[in-house]
Image (cartoon, rainbow, N blue to C red):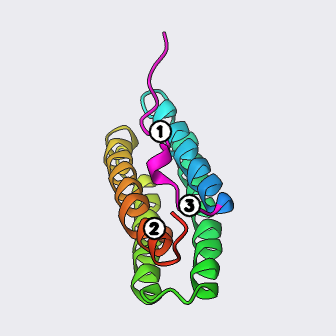
Amino acid sequence: MVTRPLMSWSPDMTVGVAMLDEEHQTLIRLINVLDAIADNGNRVSIETALSELATFAVKHFHDEESFMTRIRYSRLAEHQEQHDEFTTKVQSFLRRLAVEDHSRLVREILQYLEVWWTDHILESDKSFAIEANIA
Ligand SMILES: [Fe+2]
Protein backbone atom coordinates (compact mmCIF):
# COMPACT_ATOMS: atom_id res chain seq x y z
CA MET A 1 0.00 0.00 0.00
CA VAL A 2 1.33 3.39 -0.96
CA THR A 3 0.43 6.16 1.45
CA ARG A 4 0.66 9.76 0.49
CA PRO A 5 3.18 11.83 2.47
CA LEU A 6 1.65 14.37 4.85
CA MET A 7 3.53 17.22 3.21
CA SER A 8 5.19 17.75 -0.12
CA TRP A 9 7.42 20.51 -1.39
CA SER A 10 6.09 22.34 -4.42
CA PRO A 11 7.83 24.79 -6.77
CA ASP A 12 5.68 27.66 -5.45
CA MET A 13 7.56 27.26 -2.15
CA THR A 14 10.86 28.30 -3.69
CA VAL A 15 12.69 31.18 -2.02
CA GLY A 16 15.22 31.39 -4.83
CA VAL A 17 18.19 30.23 -2.75
CA ALA A 18 19.12 26.60 -3.48
CA MET A 19 20.51 25.89 -0.02
CA LEU A 20 17.38 27.20 1.73
CA ASP A 21 15.05 25.36 -0.66
CA GLU A 22 16.98 22.14 0.00
CA GLU A 23 16.74 22.70 3.74
CA HIS A 24 12.98 23.27 3.46
CA GLN A 25 12.76 19.99 1.54
CA THR A 26 14.70 18.22 4.29
CA LEU A 27 12.38 19.66 6.94
CA ILE A 28 9.35 18.42 5.01
CA ARG A 29 10.99 15.00 4.73
CA LEU A 30 11.61 14.92 8.50
CA ILE A 31 7.95 15.84 9.15
CA ASN A 32 6.91 12.98 6.85
CA VAL A 33 9.21 10.60 8.75
CA LEU A 34 7.43 11.58 11.97
CA ASP A 35 4.05 11.10 10.27
CA ALA A 36 5.09 7.67 8.98
CA ILE A 37 5.83 6.39 12.50
CA ALA A 38 2.97 8.25 14.23
CA ASP A 39 0.57 5.28 14.31
CA ASN A 40 2.93 2.52 15.34
CA GLY A 41 5.99 4.23 16.76
CA ASN A 42 6.78 4.02 20.46
CA ARG A 43 7.47 7.08 22.61
CA VAL A 44 11.25 6.91 22.11
CA SER A 45 11.06 6.71 18.32
CA ILE A 46 8.64 9.65 18.21
CA GLU A 47 10.85 11.69 20.54
CA THR A 48 13.88 10.83 18.41
CA ALA A 49 12.18 11.87 15.15
CA LEU A 50 10.95 15.15 16.67
CA SER A 51 14.37 15.89 18.20
CA GLU A 52 16.03 15.33 14.83
CA LEU A 53 13.59 17.75 13.24
CA ALA A 54 14.15 20.32 16.01
CA THR A 55 17.94 20.10 15.61
CA PHE A 56 17.74 20.54 11.85
CA ALA A 57 15.28 23.43 12.22
CA VAL A 58 17.77 25.28 14.46
CA LYS A 59 20.51 24.85 11.82
CA HIS A 60 18.11 25.97 9.10
CA PHE A 61 16.97 29.06 11.05
CA HIS A 62 20.61 30.00 11.55
CA ASP A 63 21.35 29.66 7.81
CA GLU A 64 18.23 31.57 6.84
CA GLU A 65 18.87 34.39 9.34
CA SER A 66 22.46 34.68 8.07
CA PHE A 67 21.10 35.09 4.56
CA MET A 68 18.54 37.68 5.69
CA THR A 69 21.30 39.60 7.49
CA ARG A 70 23.41 39.59 4.31
CA ILE A 71 20.57 41.02 2.21
CA ARG A 72 19.69 43.48 5.05
CA TYR A 73 16.14 42.19 5.16
CA SER A 74 13.86 44.89 6.61
CA ARG A 75 11.77 42.48 8.71
CA LEU A 76 14.58 40.34 10.12
CA ALA A 77 13.68 40.86 13.80
CA GLU A 78 10.05 39.93 13.23
CA HIS A 79 11.13 36.85 11.26
CA GLN A 80 13.58 35.80 13.97
CA GLU A 81 10.74 36.01 16.48
CA GLN A 82 8.74 33.51 14.43
CA HIS A 83 11.72 31.14 14.39
CA ASP A 84 12.14 31.50 18.15
CA GLU A 85 8.44 30.84 18.72
CA PHE A 86 8.70 27.63 16.69
CA THR A 87 11.73 26.45 18.65
CA THR A 88 10.01 27.17 21.97
CA LYS A 89 6.86 25.35 20.85
CA VAL A 90 8.79 22.25 19.78
CA GLN A 91 10.70 22.22 23.08
CA SER A 92 7.36 22.25 24.89
CA PHE A 93 6.11 19.37 22.70
CA LEU A 94 9.25 17.40 23.60
CA ARG A 95 8.62 17.99 27.32
CA ARG A 96 4.97 16.97 26.95
CA LEU A 97 5.94 13.82 25.03
CA ALA A 98 7.75 12.59 28.12
CA VAL A 99 4.57 12.62 30.21
CA GLU A 100 1.51 12.56 27.95
CA ASP A 101 -0.12 9.92 25.76
CA HIS A 102 2.31 10.04 22.82
CA SER A 103 -0.06 8.50 20.27
CA ARG A 104 -2.58 11.28 20.79
CA LEU A 105 -0.01 14.09 21.19
CA VAL A 106 1.86 13.19 18.00
CA ARG A 107 -1.26 14.06 15.96
CA GLU A 108 -1.40 17.51 17.58
CA ILE A 109 2.32 17.95 16.85
CA LEU A 110 1.94 16.94 13.20
CA GLN A 111 -0.97 19.28 12.69
CA TYR A 112 1.08 22.14 14.16
CA LEU A 113 4.13 21.29 12.02
CA GLU A 114 2.15 21.04 8.79
CA VAL A 115 0.33 24.35 9.29
CA TRP A 116 3.36 26.22 10.66
CA TRP A 117 5.77 25.21 7.90
CA THR A 118 3.28 25.67 5.08
CA ASP A 119 2.37 29.18 6.25
CA HIS A 120 5.93 30.08 7.16
CA ILE A 121 7.49 29.07 3.84
CA LEU A 122 4.69 30.41 1.64
CA GLU A 123 4.25 33.71 3.48
CA SER A 124 7.15 34.72 5.72
CA ASP A 125 10.01 33.15 3.77
CA LYS A 126 8.51 34.24 0.46
CA SER A 127 8.48 37.84 1.62
CA PHE A 128 12.25 37.99 2.14
CA ALA A 129 12.69 36.34 -1.25
CA ILE A 130 10.42 38.93 -2.84
CA GLU A 131 12.26 41.77 -1.11
CA ALA A 132 15.56 40.33 -2.34
CA ASN A 133 14.03 39.95 -5.82
CA ILE A 134 14.94 36.32 -6.14
CA ALA A 135 11.66 34.40 -5.96
FE1 LIG B 1 11.99 31.36 8.01
Identified at 48% across, 9% down, the residue is 1
- What residue does disc 1 label? 8
Residue 125: numbered disc: 2
Q: Quadrant of residue 29?
A: top right
Q: Is residue 17 left or right of residue 118?
A: right
Q: Earlier in the sequence, mark 1 or mark 2?
A: 1
Residue 54: numbered disc: 3
Asked if residue 2 is among those painted magenta in the image, a careful observer would answer: yes
Asked if residue 42 is among those painted magenta in the image, a careful observer would answer: no
Front-lying residue, 128 or 82: 128
* Residue 44 seen anywhere in this rendered image of the structure: no
Residue 45 is situated, as x and y percent measured from the top left of the image, at: 57, 40
Segment colored magenta: 1-17
Whole-angstrom CA distance, mark 2 to mark 3, is 18 Å
Front-lying residue, 88 or 83: 83
> Which residue is the extreme one toward the right?
19
Identified at 31% across, 48% down, the residue is 108
Residue 52 is situated, as x and y percent measured from the top left of the image, at: 62, 54
The three-letter amino acid code for the residue at tag 1 is Ser
SS class of the residue under badge 2? Answer: helix
Query: Label 2: few (<14), some or many (≥20) within 10 Å?
Result: many
Identified at 60% across, 87% down, the residue is 69
Front-lying residue, 91 or 84: 84
Q: Earlier in the sequence, mark 3 or mark 1?
A: 1
